[in-house]
Image (tube, rainbow, N blue to C red):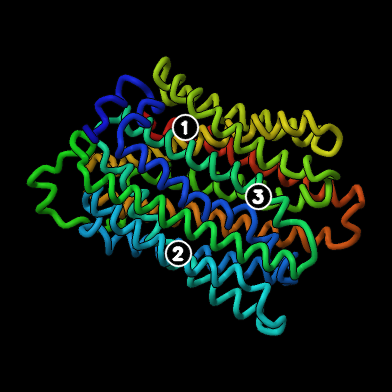
Amino acid sequence: MAGGGIAWSGGWAALWRTPLWRAYGVGHYGKSLVWYSSELLFAYFLTEACGLPPRAMGVVLALSLVINGATDMVMGHLLRRLAGTISAAARLHFAGSILAGAALLLFLATGLVPEAWRLVYALVTGLVFRLAYALYDVPQNAVLGMIASDRLRTNVSALRFVGAGLATLSIAVTAPLLLAGSATDKARAFTVFALVLWSLGMVSAGWFWRAARGGTAGAETPRSPEGTMRRPSLPVRLPMGLISVLAAECGLAACASVFTRLEPYFAATVLTSSLARGTVMACVALGGLAGQPLWTTVVERTTPSSAFRASGAMAITGALTFLLFGAHSLVLTAAAALLLGAGLGGLSMLLWAAAGACAASPALSGRHLAPTQVFGLLTLCIKVGCAIAILVVSEILVWRAGDRQAVVSALALIVPMAVMPSLGALLCLMLTPRLRLS
């Protein structure tokens, strides 16, 4: 059986016993390698390996993210029929993996082109990558809105974040190799890195497509004749439940992304040993991994709202611990990163499950929206939030452009890395009463 019956009683870990969801999790891992490499390393790559000024880096990445988000929304509307089933979505996801991987390779070769052309080259190839990534991303995300059961949807959302956590951990292990050496060495290393990501992305997406063609019995939401006859459209007015999910994800992305994008700079300038430099990235990823079974257990024993509030409180605790000890104690910094990763991972997992509920229920999305449309809107909001974060990061880097070993430089990194995730978690807690989390 390729469906989800076994997962309803066994939690997210039981999904690994079903070929469909095991392949979906692996496919999400491959896609997350590409996404989190852009989250964690693109800013550092453009400023340190390619020599772009911080504000130029901010323009390149912010503009590409906003265009990517708009493309997600348009792609979600255009694919509302082509990606109407899990198997169709998996096929489009595989096609997107080929195009996005090729575009990523072009972008990460920026450091190898003549210096005079780098800004224009990075802008053009960055836009091409973001456009291609929309086809890779939207159909696979939309699968979450095709799931019949709330409980299964929460477990699949947790499985996605396990894949994302493993991807972040993989990048954290790789990052010290990419951060070392001269600018030329870094440029070559990033090109090889892109080839590896492209290969893994295609293989994992192909596995998901193959598994989806084998059957999805019991996994998908049954479509009523009425629902299939109506043409999904984008209403001008969205219901408050969906708006709250979109607002929470946009705010969380804008705030938490400041932390992730400053991590490589923190590792390279504040931490002293190569072992320590991978610690923060790795601990955030490990926290996200450890948090998924914790939050799914809390959801099953209490309510999703209780799990959401607890994960927000944990994220704030981790951020404040990082603020107090980020420059003084590696052990406490690692503990703070674990707490922050677990808390932010719980918030995001439950918000994605809530978006899936909106996609699965016309009552929650107003006029009926196809899953690709709901998740196109969601990723638009996330990427606008990430674009805001990039502009904030670029200004922080301009401000600290002097002596990078000075105490003020460490504080210039630690303060926003602690304060911004706290604000994002606080916004989520304020919106909790308006969110449909169960």
Could you tell which of marks 1 and 3 lies nearer the N-terminus?
3
Q: Which residue is mark 1?
A: 432
In this image, 339 relative to 328: left or right?
A: left
Q: Is disc 2 placed on a helix, strand or loop?
A: helix
Amino acid residing under circle 2: Ala
Badge 2 density bin: few <14, some 14–19, many ≥20, Cα 10 Å: many
**Which label lies toward us, 1 or 3?**
3
Which quadrant does the C terminus fall into? top left
User: At which x and y percent is residue 357?
Assistant: 31, 37
Badge 3 density bin: few <14, some 14–19, many ≥20, Cα 10 Å: few
Residue at 77% across, 60% down: 397
Task: Determine the CA span between mark 1 and mark 2.
Answer: 35 Å
User: At which x and y percent is residue 365?
Assistant: 28, 45
Q: Which residue is mark 3?
A: 174
Q: Along the line of sight, which residue is nearer the eye, 155 or 380?
A: 155
Residue at 78% across, 40% down: 276
Q: Along the line of sight, which residue is nearer the eye, 46 or 389?
A: 46
User: At which x and y percent is residue 75?
Assistant: 34, 63
Amino acid residing under circle 1: Thr
Q: Which residue is mark 2?
A: 100
| Residue 33 appears in the picture as rendered | yes
In this image, 349 relative to 395: left or right?
A: left
Amino acid residing under circle 3: Thr
Task: Determine the CA span between mark 1 and mark 3.
Answer: 37 Å
**Which label lies toward us, 2 or 3?**
3
Task: Determine the CA span between mark 2 and mark 3.
Answer: 21 Å
